[in-house]
Image (cartoon, rainbow, N blue to C red):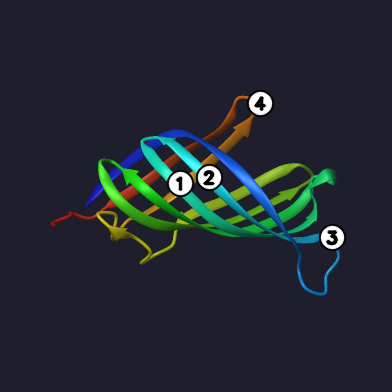
């Protein structure tokens, strides 16, 4: 098993998918597509549920995101699972690899991702482990 850390940037595009059935605008759904660059290179598609009022600094979200591309010279895919919350503009975010979701040369992957965003763009730090791979 190999433990490593990968860093890089990503761009994200959101596509609103409406409010949750029977709810008001404080509960929204959306899909998104990310393009990753750096040690993690590829694209991902995801679905997100949000609730709260981000304009006041109080909201939360959950999301599932399937990445397809390369990491550490290996090709495959895996799913990232997000849980985020903002209270009084203070963020708490947890992003981890969904166990059992790795495919191809990324089968058996585990890890966590930290995300930072500011006027310079969006960046990730991905701490991960990969099992030995044999074709």
Tag 3 or tag 4, which sits nearer the N-term? 3
Please report the residue visible at 39 percent of the width from the left and 57 percent of the height from the top: 78
Q: Secondary structure at mark 1?
A: strand
Disc 3/disc 2 C-alpha distance (Å): 24 Å
**Residue 125 drawn at (x, y percent):** 45, 38
Disc 2/disc 4 C-alpha distance (Å): 18 Å
Tag 2 or tag 1, which sits nearer the N-term? 2
Q: Residue furthest left?
A: 134
**Residue 45 drawn at (x, y percent):** 52, 54
Q: Identify residue for label 2.
A: 34
Q: Secondary structure at mark 2?
A: strand
Disc 3/disc 1 C-alpha distance (Å): 29 Å
Does the CB distance between marks 1 and 2 fall below 8 Å?
yes
Q: Nearer the viewer, mark 2 or mark 4?
A: 2
Identify which residue, 36 or 82, lies in the foreground. 36
Instruction: Determine whether, in the image, residue 75 is placed left or right of residue 48.
Output: left
Q: Sort mark 4 into few (<14), some (14-19) or many (20+) by Cα contacts within 10 Å.
A: few
Instruction: Determine whether, in the image, residue 55 is placed left or right of residue 81.
Output: right
Disc 1/disc 4 C-alpha distance (Å): 22 Å
Q: Sort mark 3 into few (<14), some (14-19) or many (20+) by Cα contacts within 10 Å.
A: few
Q: Identify residue for label 4.
A: 119
Tag 1 or tag 3, which sits nearer the N-term? 3
**Residue 25 drawn at (x, y percent):** 84, 60
Does the CB distance between marks 2 and 4 fall below 8 Å?
no
Q: Identify residue for label 1.
A: 43
Tag 4 or tag 1, which sits nearer the N-term? 1
Tag 2 or tag 3, which sits nearer the N-term? 3
State the mark number for residue 56: none
Q: Identify residue for label 3.
A: 25
């Amino acid at each position: 098993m190999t433990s490593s850390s990968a860093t890089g940037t990503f761009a994200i595009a959101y596509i609103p998918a409406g409010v949750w059935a029977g709810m008001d605008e404080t509960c929204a759904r959306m899909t998104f597509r990310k393009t990753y660059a750096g040690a993690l290179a590829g694209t991902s598609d995801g679905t997100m549920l949000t609730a709260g009022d981000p304009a006041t600094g109080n909201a939360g979200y959950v999301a599932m995101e399937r990445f397809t591309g390369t990491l550490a010279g290996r090709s495959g895919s895996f799913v990232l699972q997000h849980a985020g919350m903002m209270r009084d503009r203070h963020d708490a975010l947890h992003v981890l690899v969904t166990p059992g979701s790795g495919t191809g040369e990324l089968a058996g992957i585990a890890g966590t991702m930290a995300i930072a965003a500011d006027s310079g763009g969006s960046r990730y730090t991905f701490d991960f482990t990969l099992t030995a791979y044999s074709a």
